[in-house]
Every structure is written in structure tokens, then in C-alpha cells.
Image (cartoon, grey):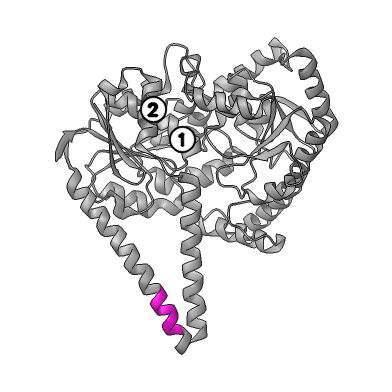
Amino acid sequence: MKIKKKWIIINLETKSREFKAKVLLAKKLAEYNYGVILINFRHLKEIKGLPKGLFLDRNILSVRKKVISEIKNKGFKFVCMDEEGLVYLNEEKYLRDRVPEETFELVDKFFCWGKEQETIIKNRHPKFISKLAIVGNPRIDLLRNEYKQLSLDHFKKIEGLYKPYILIVSNFTGVNMLNTPSNDEERYKYHLDRQRKLKLVSTSQQEQDFYNHYCYLNKLFNYFIKLPSKLAQHFPEYTIIVRPHPSEDHNIWKRAIKEIPNAKVIYEGALETWIKGSDLVINNSCTSSIESLIMNKNCVSYRPIKNEKYDQPLPNAVTKNVSTESEIIEIIENIKMKKNEPIFTDKQKEDFIAIIKNHIFIDARRNSVDNMKDEIDKLDLSDQSFNRILYKMNNLNIIFKLKLFLAFILYMCNLALTLNIKSCKKLISFYEHYKWNKAYEDHKSERIEKREILELLKEMDMDSSEKFKVTKMKQNTFIISK
């Protein structure tokens, strides 16, 4: 069956962080008769058979130049909405790592969170000013009162099981990435090697700076590891919830709290739902400070050590900073007595909001998805046919080839055992790297069900079942259209 429309392909990498936001964007575009394809894009072969249109992706790192070039060569417009474009260490590092000229020149449009991001990119790449558009981000739209009904059942479940609770939001992928070695030295080597592969570390100076940053983060991480047990012992009436980052290894946290009955490591659902039910959010250099402020929830940045070079300036600038466990305990005691009154004054909140508005498009009259739709309209896409049956056949072929490839690897390993131990080790190393990459991607993306999309659309619009059609193409790939 062929469908002829203007098509938008939206890459959805991390379900817990992006799912609701990108479904909201898909809904807005579908309302204006765009055909939208949500896809967890991992391999170039996955775009074979997709209708030419606009490809909305998450970053333009140098290491992805070949991928972006191939997408463009196949006739797609390429638009970037950098999910890491709000919070960064400093302008120079952000621009060098995430907005390199070699990939920026391939972009048709670059969606900015707000004025600050647009300004620093414009100053670095003045010849590409026309590619920039301040639109905001759908993740911020979802914090508005009009969407407070979203995930209500999950929110009630959380309240019933865990409330009252303190939420510790971990943000330590720099030292605690999923599936990394447990040995400290090997863990560091792994992280360094990954930075090299991503072309983020290439000189001796950058390697030294990475080492210093890693040591600082590791020390800070060890302070956080001790925090749940301290708070759980002091406040037995509370549940202490640790929410790891989407790319983090959960096992270190689980080992740290395994003897503590009122502490849990939980990674499920959207972060904003957990913030909504919390009495206090504790983090460091994390966007949850910004989300908490917009949602009127109490939040502190725990900074037992500080390094202005390696701490994220924005999230720490818009919340209360504390440096000791005793300060956190005192704040929780006050929250208990004052029944969740704000921990900072109206004037402080006003100042925090002013800072945020310089970094994020926030307008009571417009959502970011309205801005994105308007910018996409300007790109003048043409109607294209989409043969869904042919696309499914192409992707069945990919699955077959992957199975054949794995069978070949196993065969070669068996052959190498009889011929050459060194060759066998190389093949095993290659296979282990493949398994790690697959486990890492699976952990971040998680499985998305058609039912979840339909339920979310209904929560956003009670008449959605009559307005929208959701068609599953393959695992984590769906068409959303009118």
C-alpha cells in the first residue's frame, strides 16, 4: 500500500527522555497532514525504502559525518535538534564537540533551545546564520499545565508505592557508563577510548584535560554514592529513589543500597513524572534542576566539591546549592515541617526564571512544536509515495543479513581456534564490541509498543482515536498520520 504525503522521519534515541516529546511533535505535524515516521535509527540500511522527506536527528558530531552525508545523498533534508544543546560545560567545548563546521555545513536547519545557544553558534559560524532557528524543545512544552494529565496513571502508581520520597537524579555517565569494567583503571581506559572513537579527544592536551575531568567526576560520584544510605537512615519514613541517567550502569547504585530497605534504584517512565511526586530533587549539573523549577518542585544541587571548569553552569545557577549532607538533612526537615513550601523565595525564583528564559524559548502563547512546524513548512518538502510493504521487505532482509553475519562470526571463531589464537582473539574482541553496542542501544531505546503511542495521543487529545492512525512498521518504527 502506497501513501503519498510530505514525510518527516523523527529519530527517537532514548525512550525515557524523548518518547513523549517526540510523540507530541509527531501529533502536531500529523494534524497538518504530514506523514510522520518515528524510528529508532541505528544503521544506514534502515532508511532504505523510507520516503524522501525531512530527517530530524539528535546531533551532528564529527563522527557522524558519513551517516549525515549518506542521508543527504539519498535526497533527505537534514534537521538537527541537539538534545544536549541546553546544558554544557563551556561554549568552546560545546561548539568544538557538538557543532563542528564539517557536519554543520550539511545541515538544512538547526533547531535551537533558545537565544543563548543561537548566539554562540552564530558567533562561531556566521556564514550559517540562516540555518539557525530558535524553537525551544517539546520536552519543555510537556511541563506546562495543559499536559499535567499525561502519565496520570503512572503518577498515581508512584504515589501509591513510594510517596513520600526523595529523588536523587544521577548524571554520571562520564565515569559510570553502562556495561563498563568494574576495575577503576580499566573503566578509565574504556571511557578514554570511547572519547577517542567519538573524535572528542585527539591531542595530548585534550587527553590530560579528560583525565582531570574524569578524576573530578569520579570523586564527586563517590560522594553521591554515599548519599542514599545517609538519607535513608535519617529519614526512615521516606523512600529514597535513585534515578540513574539513561546511559548509566545501575549496578553500582544497586550494590550501594542493597542493605537499605527504604532505598530503591528505579529507571522507568519519564523523569518529569518522578519529579512531580517528589518532596525534594537532589542532583548536580543536571537538567532536572530546570525541570523542577518550571514544575514548581523543590530541588537542590549537591556540590560537596566544586570545579567551575567541570561543573555545568546553567543547572547549578537556577537552583539552591548545598555542599554538605547536613544541609540536605536540614532542608528535608524544614520541608516536613512546612509541608512542601518552596525552599527559595519568590525573588529567587524570579531570578532563576529570567536566567532560564535566556536559554530556553518559553512563551505562554506558543509551544515549541508550533515553532518547529512553522520552520518545517519553510523547507518546502514535496509529496512522496511510501510503499510500506516494500519497506518491510527491505528490513526483513536486514534482519536476515544480521543473523547470517553472526553465524559467520561464530564459524570464523571456531575456525580460528584450530588455526590461529591471535586471529581468534581479534574476532572475539570484535564480537564483544558488537554485543556491547547492541546492549547499550537496547538499554537506551527500550521497546516501544503501538499501544503506548495510542494511549499517549489519547491523553494529549481525547479525540485522537478518530483523528490519528498509528501503524507499526517494525520494532520501534511507527507511522503516525491522519
Task: Quarter of the image for the N terminus: give it.
Answer: top left
Q: Nearer the viewer, residue 244 or 234?
A: 234
Residue 463 location in percent, x, y? 31, 17
Q: Look at the picture and state if 250 lies above or below 415.
A: above
Residue in the picture at 46% in, 50% down: 442
Foreground label between 2 and 1: 2
Q: Nearer the viewer, residue 465 or 379?
A: 465
The stretch drawn in magenta includes residue 403? no
Q: Which residue is mark 1?
A: 18
Tell me, yes or no, whether the two marked residues, 2 and 1, touch with CB atoms within 8 Å.
no
Residue 370 location in percent, x, y? 36, 20
Callout count: 2
Task: Quarter of the image for the C terminus: give it.
Answer: top left
Q: Which residues are magenta?
A: 410-416
Mark 1 neighbour density, 10 Å: few (under 14) some (14–19) many (20 or more):
some
Please, what is the dominant secondary structure of the magenta stretch? Answer: helix
Instruction: Please state which amino acid type lies under the numbered disc 1.
Output: Glu
Q: Nearer the viewer, residue 394 or 51?
A: 394
Q: CA distance from mark 2 to mark 1?
A: 16 Å
Q: Secondary structure at mark 2?
A: helix
Q: Which residue is mark 2?
A: 455
